[in-house]
Image: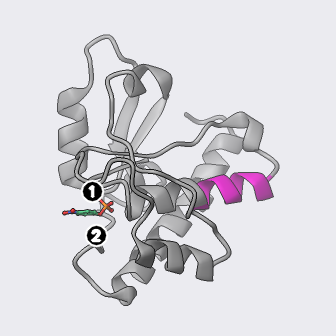
Amino acid sequence: MVCLGNICRSPTAEGVLRVQLEQAGLSAQARVDSVGTGDSHVGQPPDSRAIACANKHGVDISMLRARRLTLEDFDAFDVLLCADRTILHDARIRKPRTSHAQVELLLDWAGLGKKDVPDPYYGSARDFEHAYKLIDNAAAEIVERVRQRRF
Ligand code: 4NP
């Protein structure tokens, strides 16, 4: 899961997908992680508003710490799912030629359309909630892809 700061959208996506995979009994089928394309929040926990929003939905992301996308990630992971089109562009530019990773838009890969998860960082609790719902819906579809090994 890839966003800009790795403190709002992608740690939420990491936490939500991990919980949904656990609930589906599929935890062993996929390793989930998250990163940011930027480095301004490296080492920090998720934004307190993202932690609160996820908590409200029974997902604890407070233990996660931000890290930046590395070249190794393109070999370590089969699929890099980007929160919005800017992130997608940045991630694709960095993808080494030797990597076979799929680098895609999160909602698109989940079959929900070529749409962004809007950045809630400069927004309100409602914006965090909106991003959460999009991510939660995407995670449900991703669980199905993992179940059917479509990745
Ligand atoms: P994220 O949100 O990419 O979903 O983690 C942001 C976090 C930090 C900033 C922008 C977006 N920032 O400009 O510092």
Q: Nearer the viewer, residue 70 or 99?
A: 70
- Mark 2 and 1 residues: CB-CB less than 8 Å, in contact? yes
Q: Is residue 67 above or below residue 7?
A: above
Looking at the rendered structure, the kind of residue marked 1 is: Asp
In screen coordinates, is 23 left or right of 82? right
> What is the number of callouts on the image?
2
Question: Dot 2 lies on which element?
Answer: loop
Residue in the image at 68% along x and 75% along y: 58
Q: Position of residue 20 (x, y in %)?
A: 69, 59
Q: Nearer the viewer, residue 81 or 120?
A: 120
Q: Position of residue 62 (x, y in %)?
A: 55, 64
Looking at the rendered structure, the kind of residue marked 2 is: Pro
Question: Dot 1 lies on which element?
Answer: loop
Q: Which mark is residue 71?
A: none
Q: Give the extent of the magenta segment.
A: 16-24
Q: Can you name the residue that lies furthest to the front here? A: 43
Secondary structure mostly taken by the magenta-highlighted segment of the chain = helix
The C terminus is located in which quarter? Answer: top right
Residue in the image at 43% along x and 63% along y: 46
